Image (cartoon, rainbow, N blue to C red):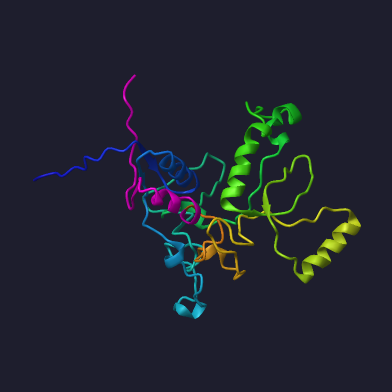
Amino acid sequence: MQIVRNRTQYDVCIVGSGAGGGMAAMVLTQAGANVVMLEAGPMWDSGTDSAMFKWPYDTPRRGAATKERQFGEFDGALGGWTLEGEPYTSAPGSQFDWFRSRMLGGRTNHWGRISLRFGPHDFKRKTLDGLGDDWPITYDDIKPYYDKIDELIGIFGAPLNMENEPDGIFLPPPKPRHYELLIKQACDKLKIPCVPSRLSILTKPHNGRAACHYCGQCGRGCATHSNFSSTSVMIPPALKTGKLTILANAMAREVVTEST
């Protein structure tokens, strides 16, 4: 029996292709590194693989949940609260349900796109509340990177000028609907701030991606790449460098390090 081994050597191996893995792949390949990415699930392209434009009657289940898609058959994420072969435990007396998605892009294919920054207070909770520990860095240290990610992925919002809700680099928010204007009028009378959400959804073309057309099917995977996912924003430019190799259906079992 002959065993054929891949002798290709890479500068970096990335395990997982979600928010962290996708960003690492983009930054490293654009810096010149040869990268291999291990993804436990299959390949996925929301432009061709999503059910964004399907009608409920396109399936005999009318879009109901399946074992593979626990948020509905048309959901953009392959996964849910349980994944075969990947059990997890909870501490005695506690319950924590961990949603996971096994596919290219991971959980970035299923999330609410709410994109908020930590504020200055969040980095020094020990000082302010007496709990936990202060971060060894401050908001001012992180702000330039928040700005970079805003410019990369596109986030709509409006300036608040609130101390612990830092403003970002925003695309214009969608125009409010009639009932939202009524809520805003009531909040203004009560002196309650009522502002647009901050979401990583494009309200105008941005970095080669089309603006949202408000179909309301974000959770199915955006076929126009108008909202943020690793597969829409970070993996394509990494692949464009020619320095990223993606190995799908390849689950990392362990990481072996040299003895010290």
Where is residue 217 drawn, in percent x and y? 56, 68
Where is residue 32 drawn, in percent x and y? 39, 39
Q: Residue furthest right?
A: 189
Q: Residue 25 occupies which quadrant of the picture?
A: top left
In the rendered view, would you say 213 is above or below 143?
below
Q: Tell me the quarter of the image containing the C terminus.
A: top left
Q: Residue 120 occupies which quadrant of the picture?
A: top right
Frontmost residue, 187 versus 247: 247
Q: Residue furthest bottom?
A: 57
Frontmost residue, 82 versus 256: 256
Where is residue 50 drawn, in percent x and y? 46, 66
Q: Is residue 159 covered in magenta?
A: no
The count of marks equals 0
Q: Residue furthest top?
A: 260
- For the record, the magenta segment spans 231-260
In the rendered view, would you say 255 is above or below 159?
above
- Residue at (52, 39) in percent of width and height: 91
- Residue at (87, 62) in percent of width and height: 186
- Residue at (56, 46) in percent of width and height: 95
Where is residue 93 drawn, in percent x and y? 56, 41
Q: Residue 163 occupies which quadrant of the picture?
A: top right
Frontmost residue, 207 versus 66: 207
- Residue at (42, 67) in percent of width and height: 48
Q: Is residue 241 visible?
A: yes
Q: Is residue 101 visible?
A: no
Horizontal side of residue 92 vs 141, given as left or right: left
